[in-house]
Amino acid sequence: MSVVNKRTVSLPAEQSSYVDQLVASGSYASASEVVRAGLRALQERDAAVERWLREDVASAYDAIQADPGRGIPATDVFASIRAHHANRLKKA
């Protein structure tokens, strides 16, 4: 087993209560397990964002840099979004 470093953390009442509920429900054996699960989820999210930036965003950026004509002006994008939103409001 890896070395365990003890930490003291402060939580707002709502988060503290949520941790207590998770432990009381039996989902986790201790508050430490809840915190470890939360940290694992953050690590997974951060890794997913890094992958997305590396694999999708960087290639899209490179493509626009190579051929700026492929880009759509922001004013056109926002006009399209506003029109779409207005149509949805009419239907509602």
Image: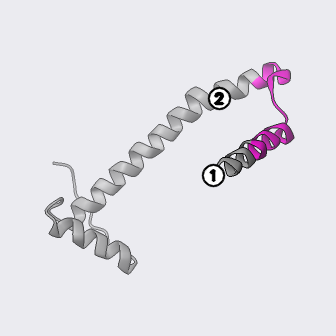
Which residue carries the number 2 mark? 58
Task: Identify whether 67 is placed above or below 81.
Answer: above
* Colour treatment of the image: one colour
Which image quadrant is residue 33 in?
Answer: bottom left
The stretch drawn in magenta includes residue 77: yes
In the rendered image, the residue lying farthest to the front is: 91
Amino acid identity at mark 1: Ala
Which image quadrant is residue 12 in?
Answer: bottom left
Secondary structure type for disc 1: loop
Report the front residue among 1 and 49.
Answer: 49
Q: Which residues are magenta?
A: 64-83
The disc, 1 or 2, on the residue closer to the chain's N-terminal end is 2
Is residue 78 visible in the rendered image? The answer is yes
The residue located at (66%, 47%) in the rendering is 91
Amino acid identity at mark 2: Ala
What is the CA distance from the residue labelled 1 to the residue labelled 2? 38 Å
Report the front residue among 53 and 1.
Answer: 53
Which residue carries the number 1 mark? 92
Q: Residues within 10 Å of mark 1 (few under 14, many from 20)?
A: few
Report the front residue among 53 and 88.
Answer: 88
Question: Horizontal placement of 38 versus 64: left or right?
Answer: left
- Residue 44 in the image: state x and y as whole percent: 39, 43
Is residue 9 visible in the rendered image? The answer is no
Secondary structure type for disc 2: helix
- Residue 70 in the image: state x and y as whole percent: 80, 22
Question: Horizontal placement of 52 versus 69: left or right?
Answer: left
Q: Residues within 10 Å of mark 2 (few under 14, many from 20)?
A: few
Report the front residue among 30 and 21.
Answer: 21
Q: From the image, give the main secondary structure of the stretch colored magenta.
A: helix
Question: Horizontal placement of 30 versus 52: left or right?
Answer: left
Which mark identifies residue 70?
Answer: none
